[in-house]
Every structure is written in structure tokens, then in C-alpha cells.
Amino acid sequence: NAFLIQIENLVSSTNDIVKAKSHSVPYVDSGYCCLAEAQSAGRGRRGRNWVSPYASSLYLSMLWRFTGGHQAMTGLSLMVGVIINETLQSLEVLNCQLKWPNDVYHEQKKLAGVLIEVEGQVGATTSAIIGIGININLPANVQGINQAFTDLSSITKKPISKNQLAAALIHKLWQNLPIFEAHGMAPFMARWKDCDLYYKKHITIVAGDKIITGTGNGIDNTGALLLDINGSIKAFHGGEISVRQA
Ligand code: BTN
């Protein structure tokens, strides 16, 4: 079988490369990856850009083809957050937390993010492009990141090998995505809960022009965020809401 890993120097966005590949002939299988040293137009969630300087982070995108359409992907971004955290743990990067839906935090600062882009259904499959950015060693003078951030070199005393991180992450995704495809979020629920940044915390949700406050109460098996609002539990779905600690 063909190699599933493409390594580039500079690309617009690794998600673009994998997206183009998902439509090309010959047909590439689930698990196809692109890694790049730098991105000129890295994207974040909610229309933000993702600052992507040279050789200072992991920029990885992976294709996964789902049969069963959009429904089969419910909770995917949360599952990917769990896998990033477990990969970091395997490299002795401990005490990371997951901020719903899928940011990886360390001591209240963002370490990694996930951007999933979904392609339309072709035949029986719908393709997800899973984009992952993990800060490794950002330049001291990095500009344009408008939130508190950290990187692996600030967290660990010993340097982390980018190759080891990439290999471990790809391996864990290849192992766990078939499990997710077969069983959905169920096998990942407890693992999410173990590192939920907002569990039992007072939080604020901004949804359009509505601001709602309550206490984080974990997630349900569709990946929705559960909020305890004066004793009644309400579920929040979707990527167009933002959450912060109240
Ligand atoms: C976020 O937290 O807003 C998501 C950030 C996702 C960044 C990664 S880097 C690799 C892939 N290519 C992109 O353009 N974005 C994702």
C-alpha cells in the first residue's frame, strides 16, 4: 500500500493539502497525513488565523473517511483532544487539560488546537480533515497570538523531539479513529472527563448575542457541553459558541 505521510517545507495550510488530496486520483485512504515545517495561511477555529512560524510547532492534518455521514463524526473533535492529551502524557507532558470542545491547555494557557473541516459526501463516505497544531518552541518574539499561550519547551525541562511527537500522535490517531468509528464517543467519555478544564467551574457561554452563565458539568455522548444552570442541566452544541471561565 502507498505511503500515507506527506512532509512539506512551507504550505498554505496542511488542511488545504489534505483536502486537495482527498479529491485526487488515485483515491487516498483514511489516515493520509500532511506535516509541514511552516504554514503561510494557517487557520484556527471560528475564522481565526493560526500563527505558524518555521519549525517551532507541529502542523499536522489527517484525512479520515467516515461511512454514515456527518452523524458518524459526532464528538470527533473531542476525541481528537483526548488523543492529543494522551500522546503528550506518553511523552511525559503531564497535567494538560481540555477546554471544550478541543483546545489543549496547560496552566490556563493554550498549548494546542484542533480544526476539523468536513468535506461533502462522495459516494458512501464523508471526509473529515483533522488539523492539529501543537506549540513546541515558539520564537520569543512571536506576534499575533491574541490569547494566553504556552509551548512544550516552556512546560518540560528536557527537549521534546518533534519527530517523536508526530510519530506518537499519528500512531494513536490511527489506532483510535477506527474505535471511534465503531463506537463513537463512548470509549472516550471517561478519558475526556479526567482532563476537563471546566468541570465544576463557573463558566460563561457566549452564543450569538446571548450570554449564559453556569457550572460546567462535563459532556454528553454527542460531545455537547453540559452546563448546570441553577440546578437544571442544559446541553450546548456546535462550534459557534465560545466559552470562558466566569
Ligand atoms: C484552533 O485552536 O483554533 C485550531 C488550530 C488548528 C491549527 C492547525 S495547524 C495544522 C492545521 N492546519 C491549519 O491551517 N490549521 C490546523
Image: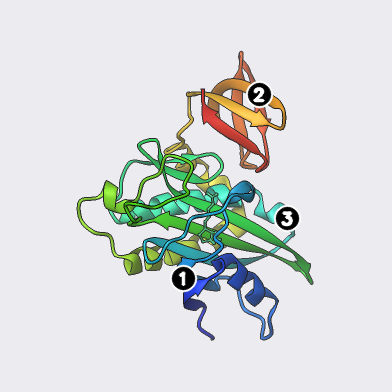
Describe residue 124's horizontal placement relative to residue 113 as left or right: right
**Residue 140, numbered label:** none
Q: Earlier in the sequence, mark 1 or mark 3?
A: 1
| Mark 1 secondary-structure assignment | strand
Q: Amino acid at mark 1?
A: Ala
Residue 115 placement (x, y as % from top left): 58, 54
Q: Earlier in the sequence, mark 2 or mark 3?
A: 3
Marks 2 and 3 close (CB-CB < 8 Å): no
Front residue of this view, candidates 161 and 8: 8
Q: Residue at x 30, y 56 (%)?
A: 91
Describe residue 195's horizontal placement relative to residue 180 as left or right: left
Describe residue 138's horizontal placement relative to residue 241 as left or right: left
Q: Earlier in the sequence, mark 1 or mark 2?
A: 1
Q: Is mark 1 within 8 Å of ligand 1?
A: yes
Q: Which residue corresponds to mark 1?
A: 36
Q: Amino acid at mark 2?
A: Ile
How crowded pointer 3 is (Cα within 10 Å; few <14, some 14-19, many 20+) is rated as some
In the rendered image, the vertical position of residue 143 relative to residue 9, given as above or below? above
| Mark 2 secondary-structure assignment | strand
**Residue 70, numbered label:** 3
Q: Which residue corresponds to mark 2?
A: 211
| Mark 3 secondary-structure assignment | helix
Q: Residue at x 20, y 51 (%)?
A: 157
In the rendered image, the vertical position of residue 95 relative to residue 16, given as above or below? above
Describe residue 192's horizontal placement relative to residue 106 as left or right: right
Q: Is mark 3 within 8 Å of ligand 1?
A: no
Q: Residue at x 66, y 33 (%)?
A: 236
Total residue callouts: 3
